[in-house]
Image (cartoon, rainbow, N blue to C red):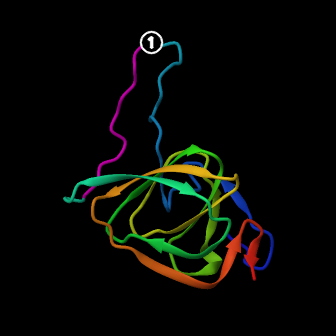
């Protein structure tokens, strides 16, 4: 959980601690490394009937003053270059915000509040979501950085 007035706790994403927010994009039940065959499997399908879109984010923010959610769309966040912190919460409750190091590609479930800040100079992230996305915003009234609350 984010400690707003204390030091920020940054978690490494794994399939257990990220389960309530989404899924890691990975090949399930990977076979032996010595096998020479390619491995291919669909790991997620969307319920949406509107199609999808791919976006490329060059993240330069060092702080966040709000989080957003998309009630009708799952969304992928796939790190391409650099290190980012990924803030997520199921509810608009500061005590329930968790922060993860975005070090592997994930599928974020629809309706999850989220925000990103960079740890490197610039961070490149590939994003895939429904072609039409409704955005809702949760304004903080203050900013959060990697140490927690920032005046």
Asked if residue 6 lies left or right of residue 88, the reply is right
Q: Say above or below: 101 vs 90.
A: above
Q: Secondary structure at mark 1?
A: loop
Q: Is residue 40 left or right of residue 30?
A: left
Q: What residue appears at the point 52 percent right and 50 percent down from the top-left corner?
A: 125
Q: Position of residue 5 (x, y in %)?
A: 78, 79
Q: Which residue is mark 1?
A: 36
Relative to 123, does residue 40 appear above or below in the rendering? above
Question: Is the residue 11 above or below the residue 93 in the image?
Answer: above
- In the image, residue 79 lies at what x, y percent? 55, 46
Q: Observer-nearest residue: 126 or 112?
A: 126
Q: Which residue is found at the position 39% from the left and 69% from the top?
A: 70
Taking the view exactly as shown, the residue that stands out farthest to the bottom is 141
Is 63 magenta? The answer is no
Quarter location, residue 72: bottom left
Residue under the point 59% across and 48% down: 14
Q: Main secondary structure of the magenta part?
A: loop
Left or right, 7 with reference to 93:
right
Residue 29, image x, y percentages: 46, 32
User: Looking at the image, which is closer to me, 117 or 95?
Assistant: 117
Q: Quarter of the image holding residue 9?
A: bottom right
Residue 106: x and y in percent read 49, 50
Quadrant where the C terminus is found in the figure: bottom right
* Span of residues in magenta: 36-47
């Amino acid at each position: 959980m984010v400690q707003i007035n204390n030091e920020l706790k940054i978690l490494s994403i794994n399939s257990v601690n990220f389960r309530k927010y989404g899924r890691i994009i990975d090949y399930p039940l990977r076979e032996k490394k010595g096998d020479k065959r390619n491995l291919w499997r669909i790991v997620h399908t969307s319920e949406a009937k509107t199609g999808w879109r791919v976006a490329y984010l060059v993240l330069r923010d060092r702080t966040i003053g709000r989080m957003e959610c998309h009630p009708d769309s799952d969304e992928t966040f796939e790190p391409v270059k650099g290190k980012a912190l990924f803030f997520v919460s199921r509810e608009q409750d500061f005590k329930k915000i968790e922060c993860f190091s975005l070090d592997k590609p994930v599928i974020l479930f629809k309706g999850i509040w989220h925000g990103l800040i960079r740890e490197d100079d610039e961070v490149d992230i590939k994003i895939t979501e429904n072609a039409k996305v409704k955005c809702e915003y949760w304004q903080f009234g203050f900013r959060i950085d990697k140490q927690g609350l920032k005046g």
